[in-house]
């Protein structure tokens, strides 16, 4: 979801799920527009057993997921903030509606996604918003530019997590925070992911090989201190039931979408694949 240099390897990443979303949005599919026209990530339910799985319920849960990452990034008024892999600008919109005196930048590889973000996300009276094409592993910004860097449910698409962390560290001001959400492989699952479990399917090329221990090591290697580590897997599980409802209502018959989503759900329910929110502070 990012790039400015046509020769960079990240430009070659294909994300069929975004192709489908953009097609359905162009067709004015109401269910898809309300579910994924703003945020393109899983939902977060404080009480998963009470999820009603209506479109409004999922839209609120998606909003709540962004809120959880913002909490990890200690987002507050008056910050310069960068959202890497910003998609349709949902997290930028979330922050824009809740905070003032913000300078908000959304970075993404896919210009089509940025076009929608620019058309749908308008800056509040006391905020500034810019959506820019660029890549996660070569951020097109000077050193010490931002107070907070976010990456909501997208880092598994990046070419190299360590390089992204180095770039985030470079553009963050001293004491700045990096917050992200990611799917974390259990020790049992990790050998399978290394055998190319994650390929070029409906969700594109996804690197699901990172474990919690890997993130601890990565923080040390890139001069970050770990300040937030939350396993929110159980809070995200209603997403899968909702996706089945949406797929049926929208007559989505993509076999790869169905099988890959089911595989992720089963692994998550078996605690083999977990969903974490992380916060790291530049030291």
Image (spheres, rainbow, N blue to C red):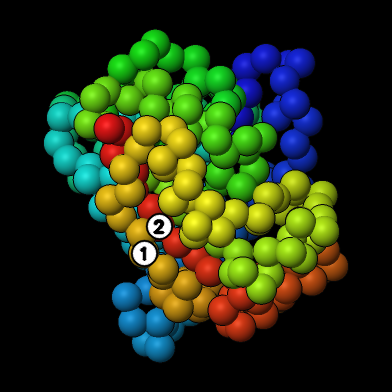
* Near-viewer residue (263 or 161): 161
Query: Can residue 59 be seen in this snapshot?
Result: no
Q: Secondary structure at mark 1?
A: strand
* Near-viewer residue (43 or 158): 158
**Residue that mark 2 sits on:** 277
Residue 180: x, y in percent? Answer: 43, 48
Query: Can residue 15 be seen in this snapshot?
Result: yes
96 on left or right of 255 = left
Neighbours of disc 1 within 10 Å: few (<14), some (14-19), many (20+) = few
80 on left or right of 230 = left
* Near-viewer residue (133 or 175): 175
Res. 134 image quadrant = top right
Task: Find the distance from the CA under tag 2 to the CA under tag 1.
Answer: 5 Å
In the picture, the disc for residue 213 is none
151 on left or right of 280 = right
The residue located at (31%, 17%) in the rendering is: 144
Instruction: Indicate whether 135 appears above or below 49.
Output: above
Instruction: Indicate whether 124 appears above or below 153.
Output: above
The residue located at (56%, 29%) in the rendering is: 163
Labels 2 and 1: the sequence-earlier one: 1
The residue located at (42%, 29%) in the rendering is: 168
């Amino acid at each position: 979801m990012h790039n400015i240099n046509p020769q960079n390897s990240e430009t070659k990443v294909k994300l069929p799920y975004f192709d489908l979303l953009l097609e359905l949005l162009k067709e004015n599919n109401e269910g898809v527009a309300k579910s994924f026209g703003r945020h393109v990530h899983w939902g977060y339910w404080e009480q998963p057993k009470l999820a009603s799985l209506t479109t409004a319920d999922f839209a609120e849960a998606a909003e709540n997921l962004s809120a959880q990452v913002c909490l990890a990034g200690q987002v507050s008024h008056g910050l310069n903030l960068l959202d890497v892999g910003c998609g349709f600008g949902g997290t930028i919109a979330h922050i824009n509606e809740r905070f003032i005196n913000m300078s908000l930048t959304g970075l993404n590889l896919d210009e089509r996604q940025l076009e929608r973000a620019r058309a749908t996300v308008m800056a509040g009276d006391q905020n500034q918003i810019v959506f820019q094409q660029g890549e996660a592993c070569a951020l097109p910004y000077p050193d010490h530019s931002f107070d907070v860097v976010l990456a909501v449910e997208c880092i598994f698409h990046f070419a190299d997590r360590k390089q992204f962390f180095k770039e985030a560290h470079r553009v963050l001001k001293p004491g700045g925070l990096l917050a992200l959400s990611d799917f974390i492989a259990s020790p049992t699952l990790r050998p399978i992911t290394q055998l190319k479990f994650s390929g070029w399917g409906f969700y594109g090329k996804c690197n699901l090989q990172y474990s919690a221990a890997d993130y601890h090591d990565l923080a040390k290697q890139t001069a970050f201190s770990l300040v937030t580590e939350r396993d929110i897997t159980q809070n995200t599980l209603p997403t899968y039931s909702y996706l089945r409802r949406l797929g049926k209502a929208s007559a989505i018959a993509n076999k790869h979408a169905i099988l890959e989503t089911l595989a992720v759900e089963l692994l998550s329910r078996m605690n083999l694949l977990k969903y974490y929110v992380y916060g790291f502070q530049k030291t």
